[in-house]
Amino acid sequence: MTRPDPAPGAGLDAARFTERVRAAYGPDGRLALPPLTEWDIFPFEGDLLVKQLADPVLPEPPRHGENPATCDCRERADDSYLWTDEHWRLGGLAEPAGVPAYLLMPRAHHDLADLPDDLAAELGVLIVRLDRILSAVPGVGRVHVNKWGDGGAHLHVWFIARPAGVLQLRGSCLPDWLDVLPPLPADDWDMLAGHVAHAMAEYGGVAHR
Ligand SMILES: [Zn+2]
């Protein structure tokens, strides 16, 4: 898999970046709070401070599964996922969370940037299909699709469903609410996971719930 060479002079320099940020500190030695903290969707209130930026760490520490030989994908059985097919596996979280959340992963050990074109094309179809399935669940207001990948090296795309009408869970703070909200009842969680697995299997692959 080839990666495009960067144009001369293009790029980010962590030391210069950090220096620039620190130069923007106010008299209290910190960046000012952004308007976000006043928005309805922000889960926290009270006296808040922006954290000071730590020194860059380069090279970065390896992510979980950075070495394919130690990645979970090698050992994990298909029936520990909700749904699988020849190239993809859909998992749930180990425990119920505050809102429905699922993870779509390629069966083979890839990150997004090294996903072969044929799998990249399948990923596009699967993202739309899962969004459609989850959006059709009664009471789901929106499905948020996210890829971060700073924790695990094996590509995993998040699908997080927001309850309709719960407007404070709109937008980019939903993952933060996920850490705050009490878990959904286990029966509700399992029933929804089973529905998603079977709805996916209607297009192919195997439901494991
Ligand atoms: Zn892997």
Image (cartoon, grey):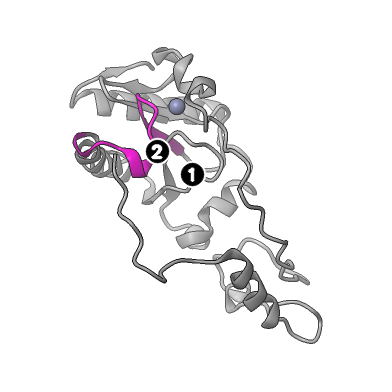
- Asked whether the viewer can see residue 18, the reply is yes
Q: Quadrant of residue 18?
A: bottom right
Would you place residue 20 above or below residue 136 in this image?
below
Callout 1 amino acid: Gly
Q: Residue at x 26, y 28 (%)?
A: 200
Secondary-structure class at tag 1 = loop
Quarter, ligand 1: top left
Crowding at label 2, few (<14), some or many (≥20) Cα neighbours within 10 Å?
Answer: some
Give the CA separation, mark 2 to mark 1: 8 Å
Whole-percent x, y for residue 77 in the image = 44, 12
Residue 25 belongs to the span the image colors magenta: no
Asked if disc 2 and disc 1 are in contact, CB closer than 8 Å, the reply is yes
Say which label, 2 or 1, has the lower sequence index.
Answer: 2
- Residue 149, disc: 1
Callout 2 amino acid: Asp
Q: Which residues are magenta?
A: 101-118
Q: Which residue is mark 2?
A: 111
Secondary-structure class at tag 2 = loop
Mark closer to the observer (2, 1):
2
